[in-house]
Image: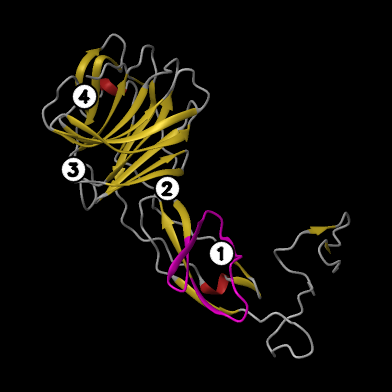
Amino acid sequence: MRLGLLLILGASAAFAYTYDYVSQVPLVEDTDAWRENGSLYFDTPGVFLNGGSLLFNHTVSGANANDYELASTLFLGYGTGATWIHLLRASGTVTNGFPANYISAEIAIPTPFTGAATLNIQRSVNGSLSLLGSTAITVTDSASVRTVIFGANLWVFVNNVLVATQTLPSVTSGDPGLAGSGVSASPGFSSVSVGPHYTGVPPAIVSSNFATSVYPNNVSMKWGASNDGTGPGLLQYSISRNGSLAASVVLPEWEDLSAQPGTTYVYGIQAVDFHGNVSTATNFTVTTPTTATGPGAAPNSVDPRRVGVRTTGSYWGGGGEQIDTLSGNL
């Protein structure tokens, strides 16, 4: 049995991506958009006692109404020892304020609270809960939480940082919703938004915007930043090397420190958005030179000294003179 209290305030969304719903004040009295389960006290708008949940009362737009994003802002108040819950694909008979079937992303705040919390991903089937995954996270008051469910995938973000991914067993349909558990004061969510799973693909990286620096034991690369247009925002870039994933980075640059001399590598870079959409790969090929070992070095060998100024180097100069601190080049 879950015992909880949940308060919902007002909100806004700040992405180019368009939500179907952005919360109104007070949310729980917007009965056109939400249906309430559990013990509700309208004299304190948005407060649930003795368990309770809110389920979205409309069909989410998009190609699949069961794939969507649920976004919220945490209002922690005095709620240490409590749990803030995103419900996903919720359906079935309500018992103790909770539907029978759902996937949940639950942020448990300990007592005392110092910023550390636990994210638990659970599944309920006919009221029987099972833990799918758990990880330690860091949260603060007013932290943003985004849960994106699509197909058999659940991605959870805190302050737009991907903190968990989960492959889901079969709970394939149902509504988004919110809940609270074990709360003794007045915390909850200060915003909530619901929107479709975006299926547009980010634009590919423009090959003419690449810059590389190739050495025997490392390959540095930079590229022009991509954008997601009207999508949910760009999450990261995935970099492959000879067909295998080598790295995922947030900034449009990376250095391969495991490259070997005299080796040809094919690198591919793809933009990935918050809803798991991936651009087509932009590929480029480099061959690292061999390391010079003396007069008999191979024709494509290089002098291991830093000759000339490298764009990724460390520079110093009070008058803008750009002195290379590793080799003294000016």
Mark 3 or 1: in front is: 3
Question: Residue 264 magenta-drawn?
Answer: yes
Task: Give the crowd class for mark 1: few <14, some 14-19, many >=20 residues within 10 Å.
Answer: some
Q: In the image, 31: left or right of 158?
A: left
Q: What numbered label is drawn on residue 16?
A: 2
Helix, strand or loop under label 1: loop
Boundaries of the magenta span = 238-267
- Front label number (2 vs 3): 3
Residue at which label 3 appears: 171
**At label 3, which amino acid type do we have?**
Val
Whole-percent x and y of residue 93? 11, 28
State the mark number for residue 31: 4
Disc 1 residue type (three-letter): Gly
Earlier along the polypeptide chain: callout 1 or callout 2?
2
Please tell me whether the stretch drawn in magenta is mainly helix, strand or loop. Answer: strand
Whole-percent x and y of residue 243? 43, 72
Q: Are marks 1 and 4 in contact (CB under 8 Å)?
A: no
- Give the secondary structure at mark 4: loop
Residue in view at x 17 percent, y 28 percent = 99
Assess whether residue 221 is covered by the magenta stretch.
Answer: no
Marks 2 and 4 in Cβ contact (< 8 Å): no
